[in-house]
Image (spheres, helix red, strand yellow):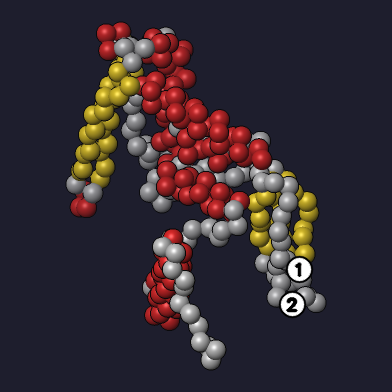
Amino acid sequence: YNHLGNNDGKNLSAPEQFRSKEISKSNVVDDMVDSNQLLYKGGVAGSGPDHVVVIKYVPYVGDSKRALDEYTSEIFMGGKNTIVMHNTCEDSLLAAPIILDLVILCEICERISIRKLHFSNDTTNNAGNDTTIANTNGVSALAASGVVGGFERFHPILSILSYLLKAPMVPGGTPVVNALASQRQCIVNVFRACVGLPPDDCMLLEHRIPSLIQSCVTTAALHRDRIKRAEENDASKDAGIDGPKRSKKQ
């Protein structure tokens, strides 16, 4: 349930405009149902959740939108759990930064081009794994046994924007991801690729397997030691003191 008094609320007071908004909000629920065929039996009448959208125009509140959301779910042994949230916010001030982020993200994605690489440890046999690399400057530093195809841009339906949109659109035949954390991680990993970093991996196996843990601890200790020595040398130079002298034997 929402009520607001700005132009958005006034426009939505028209039945045709409200119907468009109701469909876009309902599509979010439809995507949830379609993404989990075990929980919701797709195509079976009544298998999806009940969902009602209410938007009222109240001129007095102006841009200060009131939003009331209530979620009821089934829990263990047929019990019910209800979460109720009440939010009062400046509607336009929340929307404007999202529009700016959309424009910035679109512009950055226009600069990114990708091509498929063919990696192999055997230079005489190019049977390896395929991967992709992001390139934002038209120049790419590659260490691969071969390149498959030239650079290409993202699909015109820019599904990476779904993090900032209520009802994301995707190219035909591709999955709809309507999970906020996954949508954000997609953007993070694309930008990591642009600067030559591997994607974030939430498995964190290097912190769960004994031999890898020891290796990480050793590497981290060496890194801290290098930083400490660099800071000590910088402090000595600032104070006009020569760094530690080395003997001829060293």
In this orientation, which residue lies closer to the viewer: 209 or 41?
A: 209
Determine the residue positioned at 76% across, 68% down: 145
Tag of residue 145: 1
* View extreme (front): residue: 240
In this orientation, which residue lies closer to the viewer: 227 or 121?
A: 227
Q: Is residue 62 left or right of residue 128?
A: left
Q: Residues within 10 Å of mark 1 (few under 14, many from 20)?
A: some
Determine the residue positioned at 27% across, 21% down: 66
Q: Amino acid at mark 1?
A: Ser
> Mark 2 or mark 1, which is nearer the start of the sequence?
2
Residue 199 drawn above or below residue 114: below
Q: Quarter of the image holding residue 112?
A: top right
Q: Could you say where residue 7 lies in the image, as x and y percent from the top left?
A: 40, 11
Q: Residues within 10 Å of mark 2 (few under 14, many from 20)?
A: few
Residue 148 drawn above or below residue 172: below
Q: Could you say where residue 39 lies in the image, as x and y percent from the top left?
A: 38, 49
Q: Is residue 139 left or right of residue 107?
A: right
Disc 1/disc 2 C-alpha distance (Å): 8 Å
Residue highlighted by disc 2: 122
In this orientation, which residue lies closer to the viewer: 57 or 140?
A: 140
Instruction: Using the rendered image of the protein, determine whether residue 1 is visible from the camera's viewpoint.
Output: no
Tag of residue 86: none
Q: Amino acid at mark 2?
A: Asp
Q: Is residue 50 left or right of residue 123?
A: left
Task: Assess whether mark 2 and mark 1 are in contact (beta carbons under 8 angstroms).
Answer: yes
* View extreme (bottom): residue: 249
Residue 162 drawn above or below residue 59: below
Q: Secondary structure at mark 2?
A: loop
Q: Could you say where residue 15 lies in the image, as x and y percent from the top left?
A: 42, 11
Q: Could you say where residue 58 lies in the image, as x and y percent from the top left?
A: 29, 10
Instruction: Using the rendered image of the protein, determine whether residue 123 is visible from the camera's viewpoint.
Output: yes
